[in-house]
Amino acid sequence: MDLNAFLILAAVLFCIGIYGVLARRNGVLVLMSVELMLNAVNINLIAFSAYVQDVSGQVFALFVITIAAAEVGVGLAIVMLIYRNLRSPDLDKIDQLKG
Amino acid sequence: MLDYAWIIPALPAVSFFVIMFFGKRAPKHGAEIGIAAVGASFLLSCVAVVEWINRVEDATGGESHGLVALGKSIFAAGGAEHGVAPVVHTLTWWTSGGTEFGVGTTVDGLTVMMMFVVTLISLLVQIYSTAYMHDDRRYTWFFACLSLFTASMLTLVVSENLLQLLVGWELVGLCSFMLIGHWWEDRANSRAAIKAFLTTRVGDIGLMIGVIIMFFAAGTFSIVGINEYALGGEAQHSLLMFGALCLFIGIIGKSGQFPLHTWLPDAMAGPTPVSALIHAATMVVAGVYLGARVYPVLYEGFNIHDGGANFMAIIGGVTILIGALLAFVQRDIKRVLAYSTISQLGYMVMALGVGAWTAAVFHLFTHAFFKALLFLGAGSVSHSGSHHSFDMKSDMGGLRKHMPVTFATFMIGSLALAGIFPLAGFWSKDEILATAGESGFDAFVVVGLIGAVLTAAYMTRCVYLTFFGEYRGHGHPHESPRAITVPLIILSVFSVLAGFANAVPLGIHKFTEWFEPTFAFPHLVHAEFDYSLAIISVAIALVGIGIAASLWFRKEELGPFAGLTKRNALAGRGYTFLENKYYLDFLYENVIVDGIRGGVARAYYWFDQNVIDAVVKGVGRGAARAGRFAYDALDQRVVDGSINAIAAGTGEAGGAVRTVQSGRVQRYALLLFASVGVMALAVFLANVD
Amino acid sequence: MNPTIDYHALAPEIVLTVTVAVCLLVDLVARRSELVPRLASLGVLGAIVPVITLSVDGANRTMFGGTYEVDNYALVFKGLFLIVAYLTILVSFHYIGEGDYYRGEFYVLLLTSVLGMTVMASARDLVTIFVALETITIPTFALAAWRKHDTKSNEAGLKYFLIGVISTAVMLYGMSVVYGVSGANKLVGIREYLVDTNEPALFAVGVFLTLVGFAFKVSAVPFHFWAPDTYEGAPTPVTAFLSVASKAGGFVALITIVNIAFFPSKGSWQPVIFVLAAASMTLGNLAALRQTNIVRMLAYSSVAQGGFMLVPLAVAADVSSNSAWEGVVVYLLIYAGMNLGAFAAVIAVARRTGSAEISSYAGLGRTDPALAVMMTIFLFSLAGIPFLAGWFAKLVMFRAAFDSGTTGAVILGVVAAINAVIAFFYYAGVGRQMWFREPDPAVERTAVPTPLTLNAAMLIVTVGVLALGVYPQAIARLGELAFTPG
Amino acid sequence: MEWFDDWALTLAVFIPLVGMALVLLIPRAQEQAIKVTALATSVVTAAVGIGILVDFNYDKSGKLQFQADESWIDVISSRYHVGIDGIALPLLILSMLVVIGCIIYSWDHFPEPRNAKAFLALVLLLEVGMNGTFVAQDLILFFIFFEVVLLPMFFMIGVWGGPNREYASIKFFLFTLFGSALMLVGFLALFFTSKQQTFDMVQLTQFGGAGIDHTTQMLIFGGFFLGFAIKVPMFPFHTWLPDAHTEAPTVGSVLLAAILLKLGTYGFVRIALPMLPDAAKDWAPWIGLLAVIGIIYGALCCLAQTDMKRLIAFSSVAHMGFVMLGISTLTDFGINAAIFGMVAHGLITGMLFFVAGSVQERYETREMSRLGGLLTQAPKLGWILGFSAMASLGLPGLAGFWGEFPAILSAYDPSAALDGIAGSSAFTTYRTFMVIAAIGTVLAAGYLLFMLQRVAFGTPKPEFENAHVHDVHVPEWLAWAPLLVLILVLGIYPNLLFDVTDGAVTNVSTLFSG
């Protein structure tokens, strides 16, 4: 089994996630990009876990999945709140606090 | 008393505090306290003089029991076999690095002589002041200051060491500052006071450094110790030379020598009794006294024994001439006397410079009396004759009729100053010239003679303008009260007689015997009385008087002029002399009158006021300007400015940092990822083997 | 394999968990009552009890196969977190009670976060650290946006959240690399790997990426961008909590992971911390200089303070004794107190003027001298002026730098010294407003008295700051204990 | 008196702290009670000071006495170690004395915005710091006390100061903080480079920097130098001083000039020189250079001033230049002179600031062009101004002389240890310094007389012609009399002080004699 293939896949996914986070203006899409990054991590963890023959990596991945869900939950709630107050999910419009 | 000499300065010092704190409540507002204290000091000084004389007599009588040397009792290498050691007492004053520094008294002939002069003149001045300053608003304060002045001068005189002398020296300066600026309401007066203080302080730099050099050279501040060191032969000559030079700078500043003399005429801003005190017994003679005190240092440092010329003699000579010349062109009687003092101090310094120690000190002694007399006389004139003015040309004239005592005493003083036989000035001045000639300083004999002519001439002018001619003032001139005239009379007695203390041709050498230090001192030259020189100098003085008399008297109407010749033999003789030698008259009508009065003196006065004094003022102004530059340009702009610039720059940087905080969350994310990327790369590269 | 559970060791966490549950229930039954905060504070105090008994006992208790450890180190921090939590509750009591907020949930989330912190203090493997970190962070995302009708609060929450999850993702990526290269999940295992092997450069990158997550938590430059915006927009008690407890949580994680796991691989973490320290101090201070809003200023100040705290960490590898680690801990403890005090005072002032602008502090010394005195004490303590506790924090920081004695450390020490001076400028700026200026008549003041809870919180901190300033041995000993094996 | 020996210094330092706490507890309305408490505190402190003076063993003034050495912060090996010797004793007593004077002086006229409670509390806190600095024998303890004075002075300038007070107070604080931060850095570096790893000043002095390589010593000394030189202040770190003095209330200026500046010079004598003698040798000529620059520069700046207080402030720069010149010679002469100079400057400049404050209170201006004729309107005040100015310009017979002249004297013959360091010959260098310093005395006379002339002499300007000017009143007399008497007494019999300091100073100077 070629570990590198998995690692490269994870890296690419991670980078796509980064791109999404930076380029998307819609809050929801940004959240999804973050999910992409977290999943890249999961691939990494599981691949490594298999490679080093240690189960804790997979446990780690499970925790990441769970917590990512919680995170996205809170995240969506915040985006909703903003949408409710500003009537827009556009992140560019949110710059009251600066300096 | 020689062992308790500290009491003599202590009395007036205590009286200063007593007057200051209780004087206002005293019946005579403090004057009596001051007079009592100085009077007591005077009496004790007399006792000291007598004791000292006894001591010297005992020693020279061949018996050694007089040599109770309380200090060090080593005889100077080159000293006479009958040297009498000074009486020295010390207490610990301060300690540093385990070394103890003393404070105490050194009493020898010079000391007792000075104590006598200082206390006597101070006493007379104080008595005089009770009348002169009668209505002054700071009468009490004035007496307090006079007491302090006397105390300071006496401290200086009895000093055991140079540091203590420096203390007295500065205190004398302080007192003259306070007294010159006594009427400080007028800005001109306080300016004169500050000028006096600052100018002498410039000289004090020299003194201070000189004292330091001598301390490290000789390992002690003690005057006896330093003198021994200077003569010991072990001394490094360059060190002595620097020490002497620095000390001499102090003398220049204090004793009004060229070029630091300009403060002295301005110091006339003070009340007249103060002028008398400053010019006769304290302040300015402190410089000469210092020279006499540490004479071995100057003697070795300036190589006086070599003859020819030296820095000190030259400065003295120059001062004689400029002082005398400047005295010609003054309208203010006190300024005439002030310049005259400068000139006479020049004699003393020159005397020291040519090795005539005894003559210098002797001249100091005699000069004290007649100069005090002249100043007090001038004060008397202004007090009762000219309505508090000192302007000879506009407010005086013809006062001899109204103020006979003042006139007579003033005349005596003038003649003594002019060096007319047999008054005090004659003996001392003559001794200076004789010794100078004897020691091979021929050029300075000529300078001294020229000075004598000029002295006689300007004093004649002064006397004439004040006492002869028509009264030009606006007051009601009358004779001064007794408190003023009595001191005048006493001083005139001394002005007549003091010279006989050392009347060499009469075989009197008492002054030399009693007061000349023989302990740790250079071998001094004593010239024989030189009759030709004496005659020349008197004649020359008479010529001066004559010239001046004819010059000023002739311009008046015939009446007063004729009156003068009848009443005043001296002036008449001068006049006759000139009448008979008309060509001489012509000579100076055209040459000397236009030359000296109109030309040389005025030119020099211009030079003095516009160059020398301008330099003095310019230094002051330059310092102020430098100060403004240092403050405005350097301190506020550069030093403080750079600090403020750093502060401002830091603030700007803060502003720059703020702009990064744009408020856009995705820009933050970009920065975050960018930093992560860059740093991750850096970490990777750094850890790659 | 049945894990043996030491209930005494877990008691603080258990008490907290129970309290959270009870609070939730009570909140359901009795809405809008003051019962929840009271219960919450009781719960926190209750959790302190086992911390004390455990410290008295003093033995190390290891659980779950070495992934969870209750030792002196953990107890010191648990104590800190619980005290901070208690003070935060005191500070929030009226703030949350009087505003337009969900009250019950606020405390539930707060305590959950604290629970995460107590866990963090004991976490000894990557997974537990990750879970603890997220338990700390996720509730605070919500708390930051707690003022739900205020767009600024929303914005604060969003920024915090986004940067937070991104950092988490980066950290996780890093952890996955660390795990993959070392093959160990437990920190001790990672260390063993490092001692035995010459690690590849990739591992260093993994370490760096892992540190990013913590750097976000402690708001170290350049991962601090969220902090000023979030601090300003969030409700002030939340800001206080974030700047103190949450930051401390991040530091604990950082110390644990660096001290136990990464320590032998000096090259991979030391330069990073060095850069973070220098940048945080300098940029934090510079930005703080130009602030007009006090919360924002304190935000930047806490960035800078974070930089100071990183200094001993940056030199720890070159110091033979534990003094550097102790330095971080002592600094952290003192910082927690004074910063919390400062925020409490900000809340108290805002109650009167309704403003957080620094200019609204003008004349506070006249209108409310006691409050102004306390605020002054907190600020000058933050500036490190002696006999206020802050000086000792600064001292141990400098001490660590000079103990190592390497050129880099000395440079860092001098940079810190200069920064300490710059920092004074903005702290004194507030003092200047309070004392040197007349009250601004344009600012409306309501004469509401400062509530008792708030006053109590400030007073406790004031006494602490003064006492520790005069006798810092107490806190120094605590720092020393943390690194003494029980 | 075993008990007293152990506790005297602790009492001297902390009684003011207790007093401060009491003052803070009294309600603000009861101003009289506050004032009495503050005064009583300072008097009791001074009584302890007198006890120390009486019990002090003058034959062993070089030995630390009244020592107390208790554990304090063991973790960083710092101890509560206090003790006093002949160098610190005069300064401690001076500090106590000046504080009493300040409290009495402010009795009836607290500067705006009054608030006697806060003002006196700050004064007492200042006393804690000042007394503590002089008795501390542990570097960390020293540092704490050194810094404690900053806050009260900051507030004193900032709250009770003049129009530009904010700028001045922050500037003061930032400057000194910068210096002390680097000083602390120096302390720590010394701690870790010295073998004993101790902060104990006695041990560090014995250790004398042995074994620390030269470059490190030079750098550590640099830290000390910045810390102390800013406090002194030496050119070019002096710019905080004129601003601070100009804006500070009278009492603030007095305390600043009389005591606070001394902390810097004291630090040089107590810490920098004995702990790092090797580095001190290399630094000394440069310190001497800055000192003489300060003398001339300060004097020149004085000449440009129109504000009386600012003039006095700049004069401090010049006077402290003499003190530093003395220290830089590394000889017993120089250091003795420096300590005398510190005390004298404390008394004299303190007095000058008092008078300047009283003048300002009466005329509501310090602009010298508007003043004049003080001697006619308030003769006693004018007289005291004259007396203080004379003392300040180094008139023999008054205290100022004994700080100035011996310092100049010592520069003629600097420590033999310096030879070969300052260029070709230390003697040439230092003798040049000596001449420059001597010129400085003339400038000093210039600006002080200049001030005296414009303020005291002449007649009042038309705007104040009919003003009713109260002459010196009772609190002023009470506050000033001890200072005036001491100026005179020390001037006449300097051995009072030299005798106390000499033993301790010799300990320092012998480090440089070999």
Image: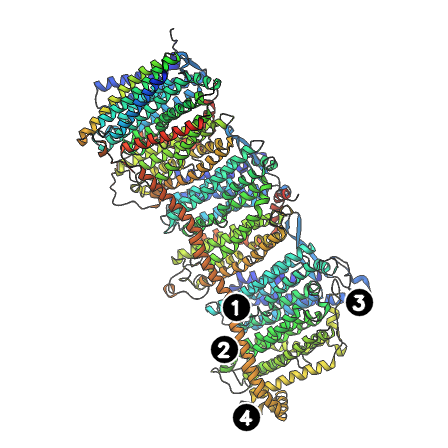
- Of mark 4 and mark 1, the one earlier in the sequence is 4
Using the image as rendered, state which of residue C235 and residue C90 is in the foreground.
Answer: C235
Q: Quadrant of residue D276?
A: top right
Q: Quadrant of residue C371?
A: top left
Q: Measuring 46% from the left and 53% from the top, which residue is drawn there?
A: D313
Which residue was labeled with disc 3? B60
Same chain check for tags 3 and 1 = yes
SS class, disc 2: loop
Q: Say the numbered circle drawn on residue B559.
A: 4
Could you tell me the amino acid type at mark 2? Ser
Give me the C-alpha separation between circle 2 and circle 1: 29 Å
Q: Say the numbered circle drawn on residue B615.
A: 1
- Please state the horizontal and vertical placement of residue B353, each as a whole percent of the image: 68, 69
Question: What's the colour scheme?
Answer: rainbow
Which residue was labeled with disc 2? B389
- Please state the horizontal and vertical placement of residue C419, each as a whole percent of the image: 42, 38
Give the letter of the chain under mark 1. B
